[in-house]
Amino acid sequence: MTDDDATDEELTYADAGVDIAASEAATAALIGAVGESAGDYAGLLDIGDRYLALATDGVGTKLLVAEALGDYSTVGIDCIAMNVNDLVAAGVRPVAFVDYLAIDEPDEATAEQIGEGLAAGASVADIELIGGETAVMPEVVSGLDLAGACAGLAAKNALFDGEAEPGDTLVGWESSGIHSNGLTLARTAATKQHGYTDRFPHPGHDTVGEALLEPTRIYTDLLDPLRAADARGAAHITGGGWTNLDRLGEHRYLVDNPFDAQSVFEFIQSEGGVSDREMHTTFNMGTGFVAAVGDDAVAASLASDTDGRVIGHVADAADSDAGAGVSIRGLDL
């Protein structure tokens, strides 16, 4: 499907219930009111010779898929991943995590599954779980919500500059699937004609729900290689999809070799009639993490030493008719 096939009946994220523009405006209003001091991915506190960094995030409406399947065993991994990956994108080493579970009524089996996922995620991320909070709030919460906060540390010279430069090489790493953003759109599309327990029509997953629940990849193992490569900056391809590259500066990001999108994205797009543009501005579409590196040879070495690959380069926005933004798969975002 291409944007040329667009019709008035295409499903968008806003149609599904999440208006990104409104969400960003509300976030900006909150930050303006509290005077928050933060980077693009984490809040930073100067503690002398280094920074203490804090990030917070949750699992979102992926929890509704877990509820439908009665399987909460992986959402703890998502909760860890969405936090630690943001810290890594800032050049910060995650060290500790606290969780917050809000429930309408206590359920020992569900809590145990969530705890197992949190422990598994913490093990992969190489961080400590140092406690958390479980709140029973039947008049506030229907079902449950899971979120958390992650603390990290970085020497002052270890943070990524966060600004790419024209001529930089873009190195990308594959996602594990849909991760934990855009699930409101994904769920709406997937359940137009299917239930979560229906057979998934592609190899790799038995049911539609299992495909949506595939846990988020954790990228903490990339931190040392990125620092060794003197990466200028990195982007966690999460909410907003490929527009996350814009956080690296007002340039033109020419992505001509992204990882293939997993079959779950094909399923969502075909079932929901979602345009290519909406898919790429909502989901990671197969590539979950991207770094900008100044030296071509170093970028190639970084890719080969990890499981990444060179996916494109950074160009001067003034040299592009489309201006600043991202070019990928025939789209100008």
Image (spheres, rainbow, N blue to C red):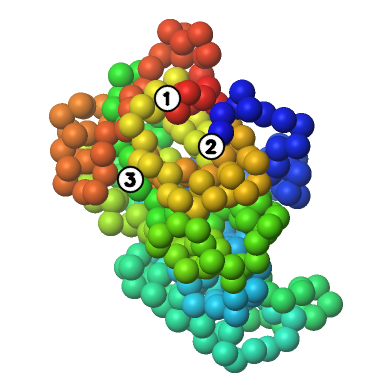
Q: Nearer the viewer, mark 1 or mark 2?
A: 2
**143 up-or-down from 276: above or below:** below
Q: Nearer the viewer, residue 119 or 66?
A: 66
Q: Nearer the viewer, residue 316 or 70?
A: 70
Q: Which of the image's four quarters has the N terminus? A: top right
The residue at the point 51 percent across, 62 percent down is 200
Q: Which residue bears the numbered disc 1?
A: 253
Instruction: Kindly tell me whether residue 16 is visible in this rendering.
Output: yes
Q: Which residue bears the numbered disc 2?
A: 280
Q: Quadrant of residue 94?
A: bottom left
Residue type marked 3: Trp
Q: Which of the image's four quarters has the C terminus? A: top right
Q: Position of residue 251 (x, y in %)?
A: 45, 20
The reply to whether the C-beta atoms of the residues labelled 1 and 3 are less than 8 Å apart is: no
Instruction: Kindly tell me whether residue 148 is visible in this rendering.
Output: no
Residue type marked 1: Tyr
Q: Bin the neighbour count of mark 2 within 10 Å (Cα to Cα): few under 14, some 14-19, many 20 and up.
A: some
Q: Position of residue 304 (x, y in %)?
A: 17, 43
Q: Position of residue 168 (x, y in %)?
A: 30, 24
Q: Quadrant of residue 254?
A: top left
Report, in whole angstroms, how far the alpha carbon at label 1 lies from the one at label 3: 16 Å
Report, in whole angstroms, how far the alpha carbon at label 1 lies from the one at label 2: 14 Å
**205 up-or-down from 128: above or below:** above
